Image (cartoon, rainbow, N blue to C red):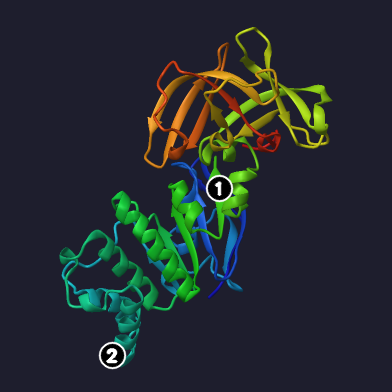
């Protein structure tokens, strides 16, 4: 196993800068995901780690070795591609053995490694089958087994589950994480699927506009985004542009006036946040699942409580997604677990929304 150090790496394609000054340390044995929108540079970075592209500036180290100038076959990496890249004329056994045969290992050693790796991915009984006789999930496991059989120091995964249907993809996420934990191999996953990255990763790197916007645990990325770009990209979010009212609410919380939001009586929407007065931020976020909804009238004058009108309802099985219009201007997204509602609300229903001061989170003004 080896860690990976990306040292001030940039990549240009003509006049276009795909990646700019990326500094990243992937720890030995961790499952690390590169996540970002299309065109953000995540596949470019993976290809530079693999050796398929050279950095325009900077260097890449695997363990203690600078591999920047080395070809892919000398980097000791296992790679799983989006399209599996299996040989259709070869059996499962021979597909997994291919990399070992290229390295001219003894036949006895090849058989031992292939048998062990197929057992790891639970495909021992299918060693003699051809790829067209396998399901999508089985083909993906063969591709993973082939990458692991060469005993790489690092495993690179380029959107390996994107061709699978939703249920199989969930199952394979569990399989993939189980395999990674058993082997302890340093793994880098490139994905555009936020849920996949959040559920699989020890840490995540968010790429945007060619720059590394934030690195952190899934919990840190989701609850404490480094800037507006990360907050807006990860999950759903309500963003408020605010100005301080210069006084504290009861309990010492800070009051903020929200721009472009007002209530039916013309008064501005006021937020209460538990953020210390020393934090400077003009934009705050509120996750939709942190908002509570009630259809029983309460104390509308309290801070962090506002009346609303149901504008749109989307039922997703385990949760209900709602778009709530304020009686004056503005709207809020709300996500509630399904058991909250005995029957689904409908468009036009009045409601009240409320949330805790601790759930109003500041976003730094710079970056993103």
What is the distance, in whole Å, between disc 2 and disc 1 at their CAs? 43 Å
Query: Left or right: where does residue 9 sit relative to residue 112?
Result: right
Among numbered discs 2 and 1, the one appearing first in the sequence? 2
Q: Secondary structure at mark 1?
A: strand
Q: Is residue 85 visible?
A: no
Q: Position of residue 69 (x, y in %)?
A: 52, 66
Look at the picture and state if 203 lies above or below 325.
Answer: below
Q: Position of residue 96 (x, y in %)?
A: 29, 75
Q: Which label sits in the foreground, 2 or 1?
A: 1
Q: Is residue 232 visible?
A: yes
Indicate which disc residue 192 carries: none
Query: Left or right: where does residue 351 sit relative to residue 193?
Result: right
**Which quadrant would residue 8 be assigned to in this image?**
bottom right
**Which quadrant would residue 86 be assigned to in this image?**
bottom left
Give the quadrant of the C terminus.
top right
Q: Which residue is mark 1?
A: 206
Query: Left or right: where does residue 115 sit relative to residue 27?
Result: left
Q: Secondary structure at mark 2?
A: helix
Q: Which residue is mark 2?
A: 107
Query: Left or right: where does residue 122 sit relative to residue 306?
Result: left
The residue that appears at 65% across and 7% down in the rendered structure is 266
Q: Position of residue 353 (x, y in %)?
A: 58, 26
**Which quadrant would residue 147 be assigned to in this image?**
bottom left
The residue that appears at 21% across and 75% down in the rendered structure is 126
Look at the picture and state if 106 lies above or below 66.
Answer: below
Look at the picture and state if 318 lies above or below 198.
Answer: above
Q: Position of residue 281 (x, y in %)?
A: 73, 32
User: Is residue 216 or residue 70 the one in the foreground?
Assistant: 216
The residue that appears at 19% across and 66% down in the rendered structure is 131
User: Is residue 339 or residue 260 the one in the foreground?
Assistant: 339
Q: Residues within 10 Å of mark 1 (few under 14, many from 20)?
A: many
Q: Residues within 10 Å of mark 2 (few under 14, many from 20)?
A: few
């Amino acid at each position: 196993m080896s860690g990976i150090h990306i040292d001030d790496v940039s990549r240009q394609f003509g006049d276009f800068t795909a990646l700019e000054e990326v500094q990243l340390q992937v720890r030995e044995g961790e499952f690390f995901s590169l996540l970002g929108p299309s065109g953000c540079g995540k596949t470019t970075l993976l290809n530079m780690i693999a050796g398929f592209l050279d950095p325009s500036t900077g260097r890449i180290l695997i363990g203690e070795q600078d591999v920047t100038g080395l070809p892919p076959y000398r980097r000791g990496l296992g790679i799983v591609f989006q399209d599996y890249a299996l040989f259709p004329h070869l059996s499962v056994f021979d597909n997994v053995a291919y990399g070992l045969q290229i390295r001219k290992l003894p036949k006895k050693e090849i058989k031992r490694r292939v048998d062990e790796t197929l057992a790891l991915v639970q495909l021992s009984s299918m060693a003699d089958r051809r790829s067209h006789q396998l399901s999508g999930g089985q083909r993906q496991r063969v591709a993973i087994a082939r990458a692991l059989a060469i005993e790489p120091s690092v495993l690179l995964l380029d959107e390996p589950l994107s061709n699978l249907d939703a249920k199989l993809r969930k199952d394979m996420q569990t399989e993939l994480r189980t395999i990674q934990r058993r082997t302890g191999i340093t793994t880098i996953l490139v994905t555009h699927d936020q849920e996949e990255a959040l559920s699989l990763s020890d840490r995540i790197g968010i790429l945007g506009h060619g720059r590394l916007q934030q690195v952190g645990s899934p919990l840190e990325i989701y609850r404490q985004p480094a800037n507006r770009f990360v907050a807006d990209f990860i999950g759903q979010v309500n963003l408020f542009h605010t100005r301080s009212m210069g006084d504290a609410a009861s309990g010492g919380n800070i009051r903020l006036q929200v721009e472009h939001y007002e209530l039916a009586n013309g008064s501005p929407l006021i937020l209460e946040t538990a953020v210390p007065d020393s934090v400077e931020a003009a934009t705050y976020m509120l996750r939709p699942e942190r908002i509570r909804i009630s259809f029983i009238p309460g104390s509308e004058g309290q801070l962090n409580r506002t009346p609303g009108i149901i504008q749109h309802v989307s039922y997703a099985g385990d949760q209900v997604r709602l778009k709530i219009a304020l009686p004056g201007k503005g709207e809020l997204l709300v996500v509630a677990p399904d058991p909250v509602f005995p029957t689904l609300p409908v468009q036009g229903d009045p409601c009240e929304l409320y949330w805790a001061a601790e759930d109003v989170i500041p976003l730094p003004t710079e970056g993103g």
